Amino acid sequence: MKNPIKTGVVALCLTVAAACPALGEALVLKGSTTVLPIAQKVAESYMKLHPAVKISLSGGGSSNGIKAIVDGTADIGNASRFIKSKEIKLATAKGIYPVPHRIALDCIVPVVNARNPVADLSTDQLKEIYLGKIKNWKEVGGADQKIVVISRDTSSGTFEVWEKLVMKKARVIPSALTVPSNGGLVQAVATTPGALGYIALGYLNDDIKALSVNQVPGTPDTTRNGLYPISRPLFMFTNGWITGRTADFMNYLLSKKGQQLVEEAGSIPVY
Amino acid sequence: MKQQTIETLVRWAFMAVALFSITALCLIMLFLVFEGVPILKHVSLKEFVFGLYWYPTSDPADFGIFPLVVGSFLVTLLSGVVSIPLGVMTALYLAEIASGRTAEIVKPMVELMASMPSVVIGFFGMVVVAPFIQKTFDIPVGLNLFNASLMLAFMSIPTICSISEDAIFSVPQALKEASFALGATHLETIVRVIVPASISGICTAVILGMSRAIGETMVVLMVAGGAAMIPGSLFDPVRPMPASIAAEMAEAPFGSEHYHALFATGLVLFAFTFVFNLVADYISHRFRQTGEASL
């Protein structure tokens, strides 16, 4: 009978401790779900090295991460995109100066069903397909089969990159299926023979096939040297230039060991 | 303490509890209105409800939820076509025809279906039903209106069945006996006496089942396909309102037009379920069977 109460009290104390920045030994990270697995891996390993430091992590999306920096509810705001000018205005109005730290790279690859013979599409072809102008796989060198266009929800970071780098701000056709997650997209493409979708490189598995874009396959190397056209940097934002514990954490993340953890988390190290 | 003081205290305590939940609900409603209405500064009500394009993050953005409303409506309607006959007939079977032992086994199983988490049903629809539909009907994709309706029907059958079963079961024995005494067969008794006598309960069951289907989020998010367009066939993907709200709310910047548009969509959805419940209430009062003589 006593134990659950005790655990409850301890948990409560821990929460209070984690939420209280005055202790100086707590770090709060919030934001993009794309950055979350990286942050998680690095935080675990960092806490092992520094048992006194309490790191609390939460998702909620890139916009929430940047918002947390503006509100001061987090030390580090994770984002899978750069800060928008609207957000900079909002921050400076409150006397906050968001500083970006490029911590990893992400590579978005077009994927098709494993049995699809097509191996390469150009960015123009991808755009035409997502505009609904190319409707059949035979128009791009495949079998006579309708293309099932699968996209991500308009609010996802992956979609934003796709919209910017492939669609060049043109609108994806309304009849495109949308799925709420990278995992859901893999599932949908794996079970639909005519499907075309796009995912972060880390989610690629044997059930689906990645296409090369403009004859360049999406790999860590082609992403880092800039040859692969659909890639993006991932950021952590802080308020002002980093000092103290935040700086120590960031240095760890950008060290060789930290970048190795980035790779383990399925993203691409910056060097 | 005096008996009377205790009485008064208990009375006030219960009233406070009742008021608490009502107040909380009212506040949520107010919040919905306050967060949803600002979208009308950017688009007119007509453009919002009857607009054909939902591009909330494009620049310039389009906030037309008509495809979402149609999606919700069609998914609910189609699931009703499947779940109402199945649910009501199962209820009739359980209450009237099945032997005591069969009913004892089947009834808990139907109720068990009601406790199935919606995410499990959604996953089932995505992994098992979608490829099946896609192969059987030889269509490009299995995540569509048809699949979502089937999964929703699956979810509303237990609600419809158990509530109408209660209604059918509570039809007075005397009515049934009188019908038999007049020489009616079992089928005639069910169709002409039992169903009319319990129609208000059955209607309430149907409408509660439907309002569960229209508000259901997880299943439609996973299996409806999520394309914000007005479907041209049974096998086109749709994007019902709850799916849109759930998928986009997390990334909509706080206080943005998109944020307000999602709350306004919630308001429209609320209006739908509210009307459903009003109709259910009206029917259950209007056709209520009072006594045995009024049939």
Image (cartoon, coloured by chain):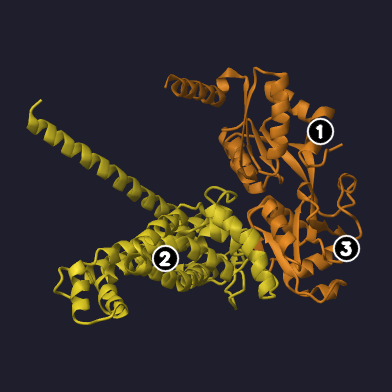
Residue A26, which numbered label? none
Say few, some or many: other residues with alpha carbon within 10 Å of mark 1 (under 14 / 14 to 19 / 20 or more): many
Q: Are marks 1 and 3 in contact (CB under 8 Å)?
A: no
Q: CA distance from mark 1 to mark 3?
A: 31 Å
Question: Which tint is chain A?
Answer: orange
Give A263 or B162, whichever is nearer the viewer: B162
| Residue at disc 2, secondary structure | helix
- Residue B223's spot in the image, x, y percent? 60, 62
The kind of residue tagged 1 is Gln
In this view, A17 is above or below B23: above
Image quadrant in which you'd find residue A120: bottom right
- Residue B279's spot in the image, x, y percent? 31, 68
Q: CA distance from mark 2 to mark 3?
A: 46 Å
Say few, some or many: other residues with alpha carbon within 10 Å of mark 2 (under 14 / 14 to 19 / 20 or more): many
Q: Is residue A56 left or right of residue B168?
A: right
Check the picture and name the quadrant holding the C terminus of chain B. bottom left
Of all chains in the rendering, the one displayed in yellow is B
The kind of residue tagged 3 is Ala
In this view, A243 is above or below B81: above
The kind of residue tagged 2 is Met
Residue ID at (80%, 43%): A105
Foreground label between 1 and 2: 2
Instruction: Identify the residue under disc 1.
Output: A259
